[in-house]
Image (tube, grey):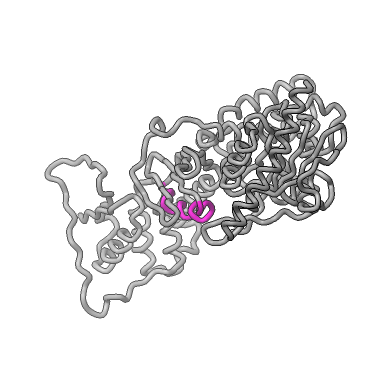
């Protein structure tokens, strides 16, 4: 009996080298036992050791090859958790030497099993790509993004490059019971797996995902029997929305029992983007939940999530920017990146407490183009601004501020409903409807892009002066009240 010890559960190169040597030495599959280094084996008698194999010399050397189709199949199937996969794949190697078209025999038990293993692995990889949700630990320079996933097969190492490409500009870790993958912006590294109990506790970002799932849930399209097929219950534990799935199903069954007999056939209408007549009853929280499923323009497809406005419901000042940036897209909050830090500093110098203002953007999804490891900001176009403007209108109706500060050309176009020059309208209060005032200024990111330090200092001072106009209006409103 020959004992072959592989370095890991996914040691394809080690398996391939051993399988070739075994086949060249005419060692039958029934005479080989495969195992993984570190795994414990129960045996009677002295422990078995690997018998070194020598590649035979002569004309037979190098004459044995397998097709690229088999190599691709084996690379996937070897990631399956079935401990018999190594023996199965070597059995196929042994048989392929004399049956070159064996892989075309889909009804062959060995071929069918290997294909089924590969499909299961691919399915698990797809689930990992679709269901992993990162949450931010720390802020800015010290921020790191963590995610927990419980894979069914040994797919983490093979799937990590997908996340390295998709989230190339942020440091992240994907924690699993088998192995943990880490990205530092340059390379993927692997460490030992951890238990679920050792993973970080739930974060507010997961709560956002739960709210999103609840807001887009359509009871009219619920097919309970189809759910285990598309998202088997063993994957529910990886979903941020897992805690509400059962309740949503239960609620739907109650609604059906109450008389909604056609709930399974007639789709629910998409959320209206028109301003409601009873706008005063809309809170920012309800608007945020509704906006999470916004599909008014194509930007939602590539963005991580909707980034809605934040701030007190009764804010006197409403700050409007252009669109969320890379940091905002990942965190789900407006103005938390470099431009947000610039804004915070300017607000403080102007005498305005950011906690007392409402901050939002004209466009609620991140528009970008990928450039290697980074995602470069792209300016929203007029159709995208118009598609998102109803959200701004409903935010305005809900908050009813005394002043709206439009920061940048995109924000000004949203606030006034038309292209509005910055320099021509800057530094003065402009009347809007319902007694609301507007103030036009530059966007904080404009200050960050200035290459000349003197110009940057000068323009930053002008930006603070603009915000001081807002501070003066805020003080006058307080005295009047």
Residue reaching furthest left? 46
The residue lying at 22 percent from left, 54 percent from top is: 3
The residue lying at 33 percent from left, 72 percent from top is: 64
Q: Position of residue 323 (x, y in %)?
A: 68, 47
Q: Position of residue 213 (x, y in %)?
A: 64, 34
Q: Position of residue 191 (x, y in %)?
A: 34, 46
Q: Position of residue 98 (x, y in %)?
A: 37, 69
* Bounds of the magenta segment: 154-169
Residue reaching furthest bottom? 59
Q: Is residue 57 visible?
A: yes
Above or below: residue 263 compared with residue 193: above
Q: Nearer the viewer, residue 308 or 45?
A: 308
The residue lying at 76 percent from left, 51 percent from top is: 384
Q: Is residue 33 magenta?
A: no
Q: Is residue 168 magenta?
A: yes
Q: Is residue 265 visible?
A: no
Above or below: residue 398 compared with residue 49: above
229 relative position to 81: left or right = right
- Quadrant location, the C terminus: top right
Q: Nearer the viewer, residue 126 or 215?
A: 215
- Dominant secondary structure of the magenta stretch? helix
43 relative position to 452: left or right = left
Q: Nearer the viewer, residue 189 or 416?
A: 416
- Quadrant location, the N terminus: bottom left
Q: Quadrant of residue 379?
A: bottom right
59 relative position to 297: left or right = left
Q: Quadrant of residue 78?
A: bottom left
């Amino acid at each position: 009996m020959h004992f072959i010890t592989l370095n890991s559960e996914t040691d394809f190169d080690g398996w391939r080298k051993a399988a070739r040597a075994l086949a060249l030495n005419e060692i039958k599959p029934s005479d080989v036992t495969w195992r993984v280094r570190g795994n414990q084996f129960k045996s009677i008698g002295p422990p078995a050791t690997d018998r070194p194999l020598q590649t035979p010399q002569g004309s037979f050397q190098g004459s044995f090859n397998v097709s690229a189709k088999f190599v691709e199949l084996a690379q996937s199937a070897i990631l399956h958790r079935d401990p018999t996969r190594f023996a199965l794949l070597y059995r196929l190697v042994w048989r392929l030497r004399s049956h070159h078209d064996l892989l075309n025999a889909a009804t062959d038990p060995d071929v069918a099993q290997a294909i089924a293993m590969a499909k299961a692995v691919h399915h698990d990889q797809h689930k990992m790509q679709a269901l992993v949700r990162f949450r931010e630990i720390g802020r800015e320079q010290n921020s790191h993004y963590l995610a927990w996933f419980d894979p069914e097969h040994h797919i983490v190492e093979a799937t990590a490059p997908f996340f390295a490409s998709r989230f190339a500009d942020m440091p992240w870790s994907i924690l699993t019971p088998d192995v943990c993958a880490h990205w530092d912006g340059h390379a993927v590294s692997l460490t030992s797996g951890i238990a679920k109990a050792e993973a970080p506790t739930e974060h507010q970002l997961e709560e956002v995902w739960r709210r999103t799932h609840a807001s887009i849930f359509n009871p009219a399209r619920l097919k309970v029997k189809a759910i285990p097929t598309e998202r088997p219950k063993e994957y529910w534990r990886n979903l941020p929305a897992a805690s509400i799935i059962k309740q949503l199903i239960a609620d739907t069954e109650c609604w059906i029992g109450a008389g909604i007999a056609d709930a399974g056939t007639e789709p629910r209408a998409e959320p209206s983007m028109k301003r409601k007549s009873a706008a005063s009853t809309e809170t920012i929280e309800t608007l945020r939940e509704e906006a999470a499923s916004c599909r008014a323009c194509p930007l939602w497809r590539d963005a991580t999530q909707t980034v809605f406005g934040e701030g007190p419901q009764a804010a006197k000042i409403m700050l409007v920017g252009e669109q969320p940036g890379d940091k905002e897209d990942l965190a789900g909050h407006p103005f938390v990146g470099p431009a947000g830090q610039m804004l915070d500093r300017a607000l403080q110098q102007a005498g305005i407490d950011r906690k007392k203002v409402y901050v939002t953007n004209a466009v609620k999804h991140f528009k970008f183009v990928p450039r290697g490891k980074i995602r470069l900001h792209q300016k929203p176009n007029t159709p995208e601004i118009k598609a998102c403007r109803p959200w701004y209108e409903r935010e305005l109706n809900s908050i009813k501020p005394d002043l709206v500060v439009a920061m940048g050309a995109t924000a000004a176009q949203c606030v006034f409903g038309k292209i509005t020059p910055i320099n021509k309208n800057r530094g003065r209060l402009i009347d809007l409807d319902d007694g609301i005032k507007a103030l036009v200024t530059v966007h904080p990111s404009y200050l960050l892009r200035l290459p000349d330090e003197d110009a940057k200092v000068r323009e930053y001072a002008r930006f603070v002066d603009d915000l001081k106009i807002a501070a003066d209006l805020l003080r006058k409103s307080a005295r009047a009240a």
